[in-house]
Image (cartoon, grey):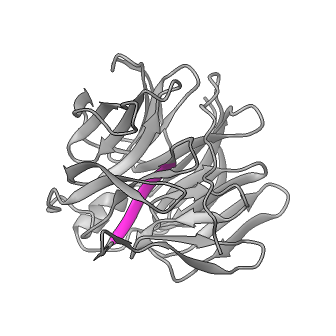
Amino acid sequence: MEFETLATGYCFLEAPRADDEGLWFTDLLLGGLYRWRRATGIERFLPDRQHIGGVALNEDGKVICGGPGGLIWFDPATRASGVLLDSIDGKPLAGANDMLPDGKGGLIFGSLTTAESAENAASNSLYRLDPDGSTTLLASGLRIANGIGLSPDGKRLYHNESLVGTFAYDVRDDGSLGPAQLFWSQTNGDGLAVDAEGGVWIACFSDADLVRLLPDGSVDRRIKMPHEVVSSLCFGGADWRDLYVTTAGNDGVAALLRGEEPPLEAGVFLARSDIPGLPVARTRFALG
């Protein structure tokens, strides 16, 4: 698999999400929401918002972003923005990390509490936000809530609990989750995407690997990336065979653990996949 470099010189790239024209992504530490188009290059929005670890697209063209304080929305046409969710059951939401539309108009997302480090306590959760604004707790006691994916039939949810492992949950008829089942014991999973055959692709943040696992949890392939810290990925394009991968360079996580800002070497890469990705739905929130 040959990768084309779309962008480089960033700090810690995250949250790739493809649309009909290209890609959205973020710089976790330097802040900002970015839009890449092959014809026009890269635009930057929301320059002061940091720690956007997840992005989703709404059916009206607006973009939903995570980060400190919860979920916000942004309109690229007008540059207007607003709050989507900043509290749950009357309690302030410290932050939101990775996310995935649930295919029913709503959004599954992980909470973000303290700084993402090896010392982080198991205080994060997975939630579902429905189009009517109601929230449902799906799983709790998580260390770092990262990549989320659904199987092609929607009956299984995959989740990277970074520093712990990748887990699978049965999705019940009412949308709640069954008990966590360890799917993959490797602990350096970050972003996650599912393909049309049910394969689970995981970005590994400490060994330059992009890994595809079969639904039984066995490793199908390991793809070496140009940088050691592979942060996330998504599929896109008209046929969903465009594979976008973001990185945090070669020292991103280690620098964070040392209390330092990573060097400006993170990048976005694009390749063509022999297996199409599973199409990602758009949310259906009434925004703005």
- Picture coordinates of residue 125, whole percent (x, y): 27, 55
Q: In this view, does 77 lie above or below 48?
A: above
Residue under the image location 37 percent in, 35 percent down: 158
Q: In the rendered structure, does residue 196 fall within the stretch colored magenta?
A: no
Residue 168's image quarter? top left
Name the foreground residue: 261 vs 147: 147
Left or right of 72 in this view: 241: right
Name the foreground residue: 52 vs 137: 137
Quadrant, the N terminus: top right
- The residue positioned farthest toward the right in the image shown: 39
- Picture coordinates of residue 153, whole percent (x, y): 51, 24
The answer, for residue 184, to whether it is visible in the render is no
Left or right of 54 in this view: 112: left
Residue under the image location 51 percent in, 43 percent down: 102
Residue under the image location 78 percent in, 36 percent down: 238
Q: In this view, does 31 lie above or below 161?
A: below
- Picture coordinates of residue 152, whole percent (x, y): 53, 25
Residue 44's image quarter? bottom right
Residue under the image location 22 percent in, 69 percent down: 258
What is the total number of numbered labels drawn onto the structure image? Answer: 0
Q: In the rendered structure, does residue 98 fall within the stretch colored magenta?
A: yes
Residue 76's image quarter? bottom right
Quadrant, the C terminus: bottom right
The answer, for residue 5, to whether it is visible in the render is yes
- Picture coordinates of residue 207, whole percent (x, y): 34, 41
Secondary structure, magenta segment, majority class: strand
Left or right of 8 in this view: 186: left
Which residues fall within the magenta stretch? 95-100
Name the foreground residue: 285 vs 32: 285
